[in-house]
Amino acid sequence: QVQLVESGGGLVQAGGSLRLSCAASGTIFKINSMGWYRQAPGNERERVAGFTSGDSTNYADSVKGRFAVSRDNAKNTVYLQMNSLKPEDTAVYYCNANLRRSRWGNDYNYWGQGTQVTVSS
């Protein structure tokens, strides 16, 4: 079993900051990529930021310059530092990881349960 557990969401005023964490646990051989998505009511889930399989980072245009993704490989944890938050950042934020559980196994996508981020104006 693999679990992704998120934390750090909450209510913040516009211009404020929050830091999200996502820890992957269980039997993990290799994490190929790990990052963050979000989904606001009535919208499709969109990728926000994360690490690619090539260890580079990418960001949605809407968050560039405000959000920063980082990770602790020893803890299989990825973080999302969100600064200068705007009301339009309000959404449920989901952690995603593409990983392999054994050396000769297949790669699978896993999702966290989501954490609510609400930015008031």
Image: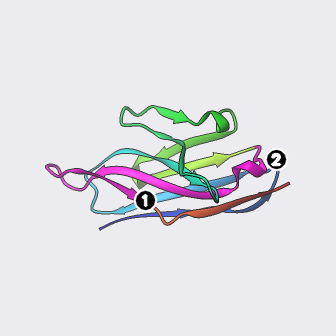
Q: Which residue is mark 1?
A: 111
In the picture as drawn, the residue positioned furthest to the left comes out as 104
Q: How many marks?
A: 2
Q: Residue at 42% across / 55% down in the picture?
A: 75
In the picture, measured across the screen, residue 94 lies left or right of residue 29, that is right
Front position in the image: 54 or 61: 61
SS under mark 1: strand
Is-magenta flag for residue 22?
no
Crowd class of label 2 (few under 14; some 14 to 19; many from 20; radius 10 Å) = some
- The span picked out in magenta is 84-111
Image coordinates for residue 8, horizontal then vertical, percent: 63, 61
Q: Residue at 70% across / 55% down in the picture?
A: 90
Q: Are marks 2 and 1 in contact (CB under 8 Å)?
A: no
In the picture, measured across the screen, residue 82 lies left or right of residue 52, that is right
Kind of residue at disc 2? Gly
Q: Residue at 25% across / 52% down in the picture?
A: 29
Instruction: Tell me the distance, in whole angstroms, between the alpha carbons under discs 2 and 1.
Output: 28 Å
Quarter of the image with the N terminus is bottom left
The mark found on residue 15 in the picture is 2
Q: Residue at 66% across / 37% down in the picture?
A: 62
Q: How is the image coloured?
A: rainbow
In the picture, measured across the screen, residue 42 lies left or right of residue 31, that is right
Image coordinates for residue 30, horizontal then vertical, percent: 28, 48
Image coordinates for residue 104, horizontal then vertical, percent: 13, 49
Chain-order first, disc 2 or disc 1 = 2
Front position in the image: 30 or 61: 61
Crowd class of label 1 (few under 14; some 14 to 19; many from 20; radius 10 Å) = many
Image coordinates for residue 32, horizontal then vertical, percent: 33, 43
SS under mark 2: loop
Kind of residue at disc 1? Trp
